[in-house]
Image (tube, rainbow, N blue to C red):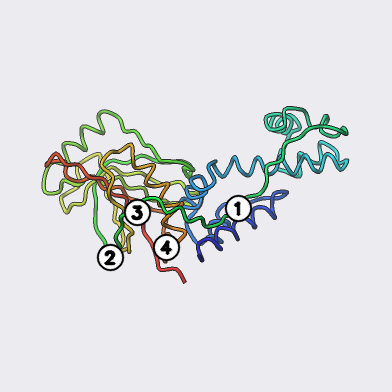
Amino acid sequence: MEWLKHMNDALLYMEDNLDGKISIEKAAQIAQCSQYHFQRMFSYIVGIPLSEYLRRRRITKAAFDLQQGDKVTDVALRYGYESPTAFNRAFQSMHGLSPSAAQKSDTVLKAFPPVSLQLTIKGATEIDYRIVEKDEFRAIGVRKKVDASPEEFLIVKFSQCEENSIIEFLKGEANDILGLFIEDSTDGSGYYYLCKKTDAPMPEGMFEVIIPKHTWAVFSGVHEPSHIEDLFRRIYTEWLPSASYDLASGMEMEVCSGLDSGIVKHEIWLPVVKNT
């Protein structure tokens, strides 16, 4: 239940700063996870991206202020809009009318309430997982820059040339394909690697990545790539709230094995630490 408290504390921090600058990095620190995992968790749990949630909350608060007689320009600046035009556009997209119209009496407006998270026991189907202690290892493959922290399911597409090169490289001593995201900055951006664990020399045009020693929560039972997003959602909304673990660094790994046997299996690996 500590996880739930940390998330609600982060939500309270953002709610208290809607009329100022909100640091997603600070919110993630309060939630005791990386910015990458914080934004992903929020999207899966609440059902909308964090950026959209904050926009709706600010426009809701803006409507209250306008009804109290505050000037449109003052309210626009208060909630982070540098121009009245941008504020008017955002306001109309939610309320269906202009900010000046909202100042009139007997005007119908929309209110998007603040979120507070609670644990709901669904009692649906079980989630298969295991905890694995894994030493540092080296992987080689191709990679793509992910410029912003993805708030929803991460889909990275490689060129045909890159796909052909990694397919050829994956032939050999290791058959498992790793889809590995590693956050490398405070804004949640990073690199997504399509790679394999190996001690072989690094071919030209590929990249080496060292994955440090970690405790991993490993989730299995997925036999189709299309089912991975559903498993991520269940991890964030069902397993994590009741587990005795917190997510650790901004990293996640998908392992695809059994390519040579015809029985392909997908696993999700998430770095975790015992919660305190």
Q: Is disc 2 in contact with disc 4, using a CB cutoff of under 8 Å?
A: no
Q: Could you classify mark 4 by the number of other residues whose Cα lies within 10 Å: few (under 14), some (14-19), or many (20 or more)?
A: some
Q: Residue at x 36, y 55 (%)?
A: 270
Amino acid type shown at disc 1:
Ser
4 or 3: mark nearer the eye: 3
Q: Which of disc 3 and disc 2 is earlier in sequence?
A: 3
Tag 3 secondary structure: loop
Depth check: give the residue in front, 205 or 152. 152
**Residue 146, image x, y percentages:** 42, 41
Q: Which of disc 2 and disc 1 is earlier in sequence?
A: 1
Tag 1 secondary structure: loop
**Residue 169, image x, y percentages:** 17, 40
Q: Which mark is residue 133?
A: 2
**Residue 134, image x, y percentages:** 26, 63
Q: Which mark is residue 47?
A: none
Q: Which of disc 3 and disc 4 is earlier in sequence?
A: 3
Q: Which mark is residue 23?
A: 1
Q: Is disc 1 in contact with disc 3, using a CB cutoff of under 8 Å?
A: no
1 or 3: mark nearer the eye: 3
Q: Which residue is mark 3?
A: 126
